[in-house]
Image: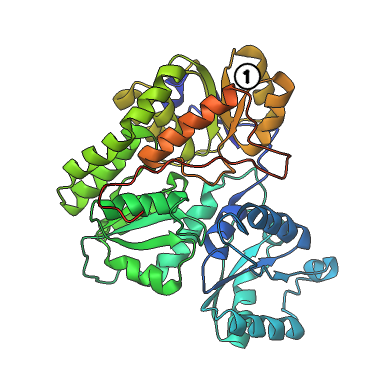
Amino acid sequence: MQKYIGGIEGFLEQDAAKESAFWADYQVLGPMFAALRMFMTMDDVLTVIVGAKGCAYHLNFTIVAWGEIDFFLGKRPLPVLEYRQQQIALGDFTPPEDWLRRMKKLCGVYRARRIVLLPTDALLLCGADLAGVAGEIQKFTGIQTEALEIAGMSSPNQWAGYDAALEALYRPYLGKSYRHEKSVNLVGWMWPSRHRGHEIGCCIDMLKELQIPVNAVISGGSSLADIEKSMHAGANALVCSSVMGNLLQRLDEEGIRLAGPRAPYGFSGTREWLTSIADVLELSVYDGIDAMEKRYRDLFEKNREQLSGKKVFVSGGPGRLIGLLHTLADYGMDIQAAAMFWPHAWSQEDIRHMLRDHGVKMKEFILSPGLDDLERVACQYDVDVWLGGYQEQHTCKRHGIPFVPITVYTVPHVGFEGAVNLGNKLLLAMSGYSFTESQFIAREVEGVICPSNDSNQ
């Protein structure tokens, strides 16, 4: 994994990040997890783990525990095509006929239109004929089947999974001619939920208030028909910037302009996001953005009076971290150190944007943090409150640092309301509130919604 520790300006230098031989990883989620999140929450795609059952158990538990109830994922199948050591040694990867029959039945039950194979690292390393396996499954089931050769281990960059998944979804539609309309796709939402109290609902509601039509949500809760329908949109906007990739650049060239390349966090980031979408679609909605912001301004300023100057550590993926930096900068907090779980190809430009346009400052920037880095930060810096991944709560408990989880939550952290919600959470944490009842049970708080006068909310 690429590693960097140093000043934030140094991260912008060419080849600043170096390959590290040691990484005390605490995320344990690699490219396969990212791709699985894209496919498993769709309506008519079945994902198959090819290899060890243990990988499927780990991935399935992580996704289901996260979203089964909170984000309406429900029960979703995750079939496993397992091979014995003898089969791997002999290169015999023919799928058993009884497995094929069960798979065909499952496709009928779930009305699958596409099957995606995700091989474990053992299958990749031994040179298995995955295209041949996909062909056998497609021939028996009659369902389009393809294999994505992306790593299961966490050491390769998780972003590769998102990029490969998006490319696979859109490949059948690239290079064709579509008529584009004044609507936007929301890209990077991984759950079936469209609930107003979740981040996707917040984004949809903001755009609805501004009379900006949403064409499709990619990819959670959508179907392959929605993917094709999304080709008629005039813009793509990211609700999770971690999925930013080559595919979105290609779609931009084909007429679906890339707008809102960074998720709408903080007052500054939300205004940038909405303005970018409006500019691309040539819609004059700026008075509406002003009115929306005004409804939350007093609550935001009340929080800012108490948060300004407080010392904070923050971590997150390449999308969420940039968003959280927006929020913390808006609140005038003193960022001691920040950590990015893993980079994508646009991370340096995102950081440059935050330095140049938003005056973000910090004492230290860490790329690919390990457990050892967390312990050092907790010991080295005077931190009033810590925003980080769910696993980081253990470091905070050891050192008595107030903690706000930024990977496991339900109320929106995006939009003007999300900035207020995060401010409320920071203040609650510093007053002694714990957002975790136990390591398995979260204690979420109510979100803030200030509806417009003509809203039905």
Where 369 falls versus 240 (above or below)? above
Residue at image location 39% in from the left, 39% down from the top: 417
Where 151 falls versus 368 (above or below)? below
Residue at image location 32% in from the left, 56% down from the top: 456
Residue at image location 68% in from the left, 63% down from the top: 127
Image spot of residue 109 (x, y percent): 61, 82
Image spot of residue 217 (x, y percent): 40, 60
Dividing the picture into quadrants, the one containing residue 273 is top left
- Three-letter amino acid code at the position of disc 1: Val
Using the image as rendered, state which of residue 407 and residue 135 is in the foreground.
407
Using the image as rendered, state which of residue 19 and residue 221 is in the foreground.
221
SS of the residue under disc 1: helix
Where 206 falls versus 437 (above or below)? below
Q: Residue furthest right?
A: 86
Horizontal side of residue 23 vs 89, given as left or right: left
Name the residue carrying label 1: 377
Residue at image location 65% in from the left, 21% down from the top: 401
